[in-house]
Each structure stands twice: as C-alpha cells, then as structure tokens.
Image: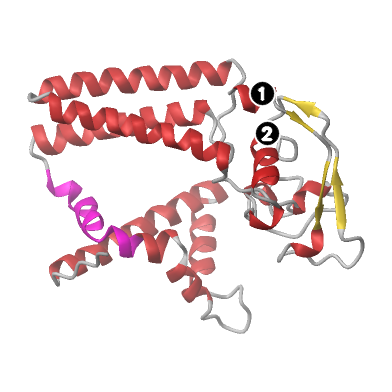
Amino acid sequence: MVLLYGLYVENWAFDVSSLSFSTSSGANTQTVHCGLRGSLEPPCNAVGFIDRILLGEQHLYQHPVYIRTKECSVNSPDYGPLPPNSPAWCLAPFDPEGILSSLMAAITCFVGLHYGHILVHCKSHMQRLIFWSISSLVLLSSGYILSILGVPFSKPLYTLSYMFITAGASGVVLSAIYFLVDIKCIRKPSLIFQWMGMNALIVYALAACDIFPAALQGLYLHSPENNLVDFSETLLQSVFHSQKWGTLAFVMLEILFWGVVAGILHVKRIYIKI
C-alpha cells in the first residue's frame, strides 16, 4: 500500500517496435507522461513502474488487459483495433503478475493457510463453519470498506481490496459447499466439481490456457471469424439479446462441457498427473 500510493512515477518511454502486436510504421518510441504519485490508472501506477525498473520492458507481458479498455479498443471490452487518437500507453507492456502484485497475491496464500488451519485444529463441523464464516465476513467487510475509501477493486493491480473481497467470497463458497457436501451429505450436484478436481491439470491446460479453444478457432469456414467458438458465443448473445448475459451463458456452457469431459475421463479411470 505504501509503495502503491507513495512511490513517485516519472515520465517514461517504451519501444513500440519491440511489441509483437504493434503494426506501427512510424516512430518507434512512445513517451508516457506521468510525473505523479498515487495513480492507479494503467499508464502511471507503481506496479508497472517497479516492474519496468527491476525486470525491464522486454520481460513484461506484451498484451496487457487494458488493451481492451474504451481508450484502447474500438471493440471494448473485447480486443480490437486502436481507436483514433488513442493514448500512447495502449501499446505499452504491463505484467499483471509482476513483483508488487505477486507480493499481494502471496497474502492470499496465507489466507488459504488460515482456512486450512481451521480445518485441522477444529474437529467439529459447526466450529469449522463458524470460524470460516467469521473469517469470510471480516475479509469481505474489509475489502468493501477499502473500496469505499478509494482502494479500487482491481485484478491487474491485485489491490488489497481485490484480495480481501475475492478471499472472503471464496470462504463463503467453501463454507456453503462444506455444509451441503460434508454435513448434509448432498453430494450428487457437486460430482462435476469432483471430476474436474481429479483431472484439474488437463482441464486447466486445455481450457484455461485456451489451447483447445484456439485449436477449434483454427477450423473455420471461408474466414477465421466463422469458427465454432465465435459462432456459439455470438448465437448465445443474440438469444439473450445481451452481450454480457450471452457471454456469461457461453462461459457456463464451457464449464459444463469441461465437467462432462472430466467425467468421461473419470469413468475411463484416466487421471493425468505430474
């Protein structure tokens, strides 16, 4: 928090020609004007400043999430061409898993360790639920208070409010699943999660890393846009008459698909491990 709000960020420049997604044929160097402290905006935050100093521009992620903002994409919130008069920082590298954000992410590990300690040291179901619920409520409350006080809910910066709220929400979900599965013994609805957990590696590699969707997008009719993935998402968006709800339905359908795949692997007794 001290570094995020107290570190002075100077003006800085980056080489556009080094970025793989750049199509610029003009000047290769762009200057981003900052000269301030406490900014959480994409070009002038302390997270990116520390990474540029310690890691170097060439070692940062070259396709930052803010390339999908309104300032940087005509198809926002999706990727797209740069709009006219877009700011220079739209092409600047930024690593969401840099040094400062990784330090904040490490706190999440200690929160998980705390929940694990409760599981080990508390022997009764009710004790576990009570301590988990109290911890989750404290985390959620702290996160929302920080958000109200001006610490934004930001995943790319992995702010303290983001860490508190996501950790608290995860604790609430953990408590609910524990109550249904371990106390009430209602286990059939959770079988899909059990199957995915047994083959978490292959599901993560193919789905979360976009290996399988990318392979499907390589099969298209006449033009790259006419592929099964984009067609399915567009169809759902038209059915729901909403881009957001259609995308949500597409994501839920994708999760269900991988749950079924994991279930088939479980039936076949195929478990991929390292």
How far across and down, in percent of the image, does residue 243 sit? Answer: 56, 51
Q: Which residue is mark 1?
A: 5
Image mark for residue 203: none
178 sits to left or right of 201: left
How far across and down, in percent of the image, does residue 262 sit? Answer: 24, 63
Instruction: Name which of mark 2 and mark 1 comes first in the sequence.
Output: 1
Residue pictured at 31% horizontal, 33% vertical = 112
Q: Is residue 70 magenta?
A: no
> Gap in Å between the C-alphas at discs 2 and 1?
7 Å
Residue pictured at 55% horizontal, 51% vertical = 241
Q: Is residue 74 above or below residue 24?
A: above
Type of amino acid at the residue the image marks with label 1: Tyr
What is the crowding at mark 2: few (fewer than 14 residues within 10 Å), some, or many (at least 20)? many
Which sits in the foreground, 40 or 48?
A: 48
- Which picture quadrant has residue 138? top left
Circle 2/circle 1 CB separation < 8 Å: yes
- Which picture quadrant has residue 41? top right
Q: Is residue 17 visible?
A: yes
* Magenta: main secondary structure: helix
- In what element is the residue under mark 2? helix
Residue pictured at 84% horizontal, 38% vertical = 11
Residue pictured at 40% horizontal, 34% vertical = 108
* Quadrant assignment for the N terminus: top right
Q: Is residue 257 visible?
A: no
Q: Going by the picture, which residue comes out furthest to the bottom?
A: 222
Which sits in the foreground, 254 or 34?
A: 34
Write the start and end of the magenta stretch as one range.
187-203
Q: Is residue 221 above or below residue 259?
A: below
Q: Is residue 101 above or below residue 141?
A: below
Q: Going by the picture, which residue comes out furthest to the front?
A: 54
Type of amino acid at the residue the image marks with label 2: Ala
25 sits to left or right of 101: right
